[in-house]
Amino acid sequence: MISLGELARTIDATCVGDTEQPIDSVADLKTARPGQISFLTSKDYLPFLESTKASAVITSEKLAEGYQGNLLLMANPYLGYAKTAQLLDTTPKPAAVGIHPTAVIAEDAILGENVSIGPLTVIEADCQVGDNVCIGANVCLGQGVEIGADSLVYPNVTFYHGVKVGKRAIFHSGSVVGSDGFGFANESGSWVKIPQLGRVVIGDDFEAGANTTIDRGALEDTKIGNGVILDNLVHIAHNVKLGDKTAIAATSGIAGGTRLGKGCTVSGRVSIIGHLEICDNVHLTVDTLVTRSIDKPGIYSSGDVAQPNRQWKRKIARLRQLDDLFQKVKQLEADIEQLQQDRDSEND
């Protein structure tokens, strides 16, 4: 529970209305009840503003025009919502069990202060776990893994040998870090495995979603910068480099050796082939296929959008005709050029 005035000071918003109004949780405009706070970031949801039962709304000055209820005004109301949701978050934290008696920990492993390790977790030789790290049940830390302070590892996460993770990282269940990259050579139809000798090195304030995989480098390390966030089911291949504060949404994949700059965003189902260079502040929309390096910041797209099936079929039929149409246009251009030459000759 927090007063509206105190909340405004905490998230750096301007409070309009009753500063003593108690707020206990966050809710959607349409379903909010008294005591809850909601947010409005788009004019598309203005019809719900007048009917909301929320005790306060986080929004911008422009969208709040004419509203008589309690307000927290911000230039970026979505950021205000994020900060408020953090303050009022009711998600249960993993239980602080200390060191569970069924955990298997190597004698030379170094554990920081206030570390919690869940049941059936295995920590192998030469591992280092920082202060205030919470590791859930059935987690495996391979030989030589380092986990920075204040990190959270949910159950069933696997770190292969030599992985190094910075501070305040979060790994959701099923994520695998440091597995072998997809390296094979072909010998007369048979595949010869190439040992993957690099590591995975991850910076501070990182988050990996459920069932996300990050391959170790073949020779050099796979490197992920500070403040990077990965959604569920993201795949990062061997020797990929991710710049600081890059975000990648679910079911996207980056092939080996590609470098992605700082501040990039990758939407869902994006595929980036290997050994490309992508500069800072590139934003890839849903279903984009990247086959060439990108050296200019901006928004890039290639995916199609849903449409009525009959319309889609007509479009595909026309696409199949493009080559014939192109050849006909070339022939017409040649005929026109010849006619012009003949006319010029007659005038001479």
Image (cartoon, rainbow, N blue to C red):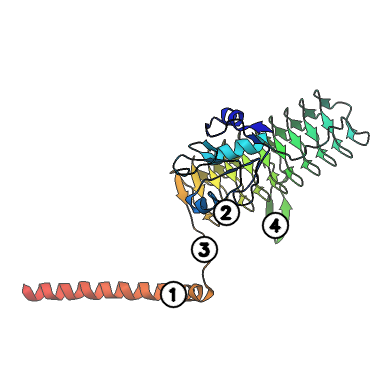
Q: CA distance from mark 1 to mark 2?
A: 26 Å
The residue closer to the viewer here, 125 or 243, is 243
The residue closer to the viewer here, 32 or 271, is 32
Q: CA distance from mark 1 to mark 3?
A: 17 Å
Q: CA distance from mark 4 to mark 1?
A: 43 Å
Camera-near label (3 vs 2) is: 3
Q: Residue at x 65, y 36 (%)?
A: 23
Q: CA distance from mark 2 to mark 4?
A: 32 Å
Q: Residue furthest top?
A: 113
Q: Which of disc 2 and disc 1 is earlier in sequence?
A: 2
Residue where numbered disc 3 is placed: 305
Residue type at mark 3: give it: Val
Q: Which of disc 4 and disc 3 is earlier in sequence?
A: 4
Residue where numbered disc 4 is placed: 187
**Residue 32 horizontal/vertical position (percent):** 64, 47
Residue where numbered disc 2 is placed: 270
